[in-house]
Image: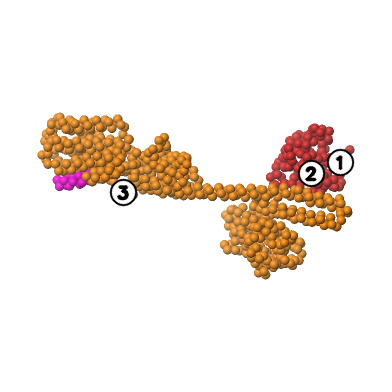
Amino acid sequence: MNDAIRVLVAEDNEDHLFFIVRALREVSGVGFEIDAVRDGEEALDFVHRRGRFADRPRPHMILLDIKMPKISGLEVLKDLKQHPELRQIPITVLSSSDRAEDIDEAYRLGTNTYLVKNMDIEGLKRDLADAKEYWTETARLPRPPQ
Amino acid sequence: MSQAVELARWVSTGLFVALAIGTGYRAWRRRRPSAVWAFVTFGALALVSVLGRVLPADAPLLVEKANIVLLLAFAWALFRFAASFGRIAPRWVRIGDLVTFGLAVWTLLLPELPTDSRPAWFETWLTAFVVTWVGLVTAVGVSLWRAGRTEPTVARRRMRLLGSGAFAMGIALIGAAYAPDGSAEPWSLAVQLLAVASAVAFVLGLAPPPTLRIAWRQPEERKLYTSAIKLLSATHRDEVAPLVLPDVAAVVGAEAAWVLDADGELLATHGDRPGSVDQAMSVPAGPHTIHVRPSRYAPFFGDEEQRLLRRLTLLAGLAFERIEAVEREREARAEAEAANEELEAFVYSASHDLKSPLIAMLGYLGVVDQEYGETIDERLAWYLERMRVNGAYMRALIDDLLELSRVGRVDTDVTAVPLGEVATEVADEIGARYPEATIKVGELPVIWLNDVRARQLFTNLLENACRYGGRPDVRVAVRADRGPHGAVVIAVEDDGQGIPAEYRDRVFGVFERLAPEDSPGTGIGLAICAKIVEAADGDIHVEEGAAGGARVVVTLPPSAHVDAPAQEMEVRS
């Protein structure tokens, strides 16, 4: 059995993606298998296993940016959380917006957590370590849908 | 007794002559059909009356008959006067004309005017005369009386007096024509008194004295008064017309009234606005014009009311002008507020977007350190350090700008904030960063404020005092006082180098700094403080402290006190 936790990171900003992936890699403990997509359309294709992502296994959890081209993170959230099978995948919204309206809307659409992006690399590492600890040690992740 | 009859005759004759002169003058001045008919009416009546006085008992038959025709002409002219307002059907006017003409010819053809015994042919003529005469004046009375219903009070009273005068004349004529043989004297006295009464009614109806007019005008004056009150409280342009037009119409007995703006655009109407508005009167009302189509009786009876109308339209004009000024001001304020909100939203999003690449740059600097730390030489390390310091400063600037754009927009809910606790906590934090400084917090009140903003206020003020004091061991004191009318006065005072008088206003501006460019701080702290205090309807200023340092004084309204009266608390929360 593969111990690695598959994480899908949906993030259009190259720099942010760089720091998120870097921070996730540096977090010690259970290994992460990271897939990255650059817009909402790709994110949906990936989770629905369509197109070039047809043979990729579904992720255990998703880190989702809100402001993305083509399909926004909130729409991805809405789609996945309305899907009877895919709604079980925990989603962490990782956004640079700390506006109460954005946070409320994300939870209304069913996000499991909302993190405000801390682009200070140390802060980001800390936040992602906390999130990882929570999802892999404190809480239990569901098995990803097949 | 006969002297009384004689006196009454002279009085009525005098009054009729006065009426003839008065209406004649008016007809000459106005040249309107109604004025001309009024003159013909009372001219004929005065002639009849005067001839009755001066003709000798044995005057020629033709002259006596002519006098009777004149009496008939009076009734007919009065009838035509009433008809001149267009309220008697033309068919009836023609019938009136024909009957009158026929009767006049019949009168002139009479062989004699018997005095003692009346033959049957004479009785027939007399009955025809009385019926025609009474019919004409009754038509006048009924027509004027009924039309008066929709007229303003003064016009209505005048019309009804004329109508009553006509009735009284009719009764007097019947009385004179059918005097019973026995009681000649009291009878003719009664007839003469009736004639005097009708003359008085005509005089009052045609030219009421000012005191009567003022008394009669009371209902319209009251209407004007209540209109004025209502107009004063109107706050919207659309409220004015419905308030004023019904009163405008009522004051002049108009069938319709409407308002046009300067471009001739119809703003509002009351009543049925006629297709042809030729007869309409227009009166300026501030930026607009009020048009009325007065009743047909208004030109003759309503001159008084037109003055009232002008007063009313003057008030309406003032109301229109006032409301337009208020609306212009409201629009300007809304525009300014919208522009301000737009600017704040712009500052927020621009700062936010600027922050993202900056943070990435700072992140990569960290990565460079992590990955190449050991191979970096001293010079490169210094360059990298300067990049980091400048990046950090830029980040602090952006954070402060973001914060400034949030004050008054985000975190606006107000709670009871114990300032003493907040200031002590902040003093501990700042004290940890400036270990040599001393911060003393006195007794501070509990006030209504947003707790995030209260903390921010003290953080910025205490940090400024320590940072710009000019020496590390600066001493800072926070005190509170009750100002005039119970205002909350909070002073943060230090014994540092102070702020020169000429800069004391400028320090509250954004990016205004007195310290050199490379010293810490962004120059936004006091601007944030000023905005927090202004959002709480307060005032902030800086003055020289007792020990020559700076004293920042924050004054908040009395209602900021938590123990302030309940209704003021509600206003704030």
Amino acid carrying mark 1 in the image: Ala
Q: Marks 3 and 2: in contact by CB < 8 Å? A: no
Badge 3, how many Cα within 10 Å: few under 14, some, many 20+? few
Q: Mark 3 falls within which chain?
A: B
Q: Toward the viewer: B457 or B278? A: B278
**Which residue has dot 1 on it?**
A4
Could you tell me which residue is drawn at 81 percent across and 33 percent down?
Answer: A52
Q: Toward the viewer: B117 or B391? A: B391
Chain coloured red: which letter? A
Question: Residue B529: image x %, image y %?
Answer: 66, 58
Judge left or right: residue B401 versus residue B278: right
Q: Toward the viewer: B498 or B372? A: B372
Q: Which labelled disc corresponds to residue B212?
A: 3
Q: Chain B is drawn in which colour?
A: orange
* Start-end of magenta stretch: B1-16
Q: Mark 2 falls within which chain?
A: A
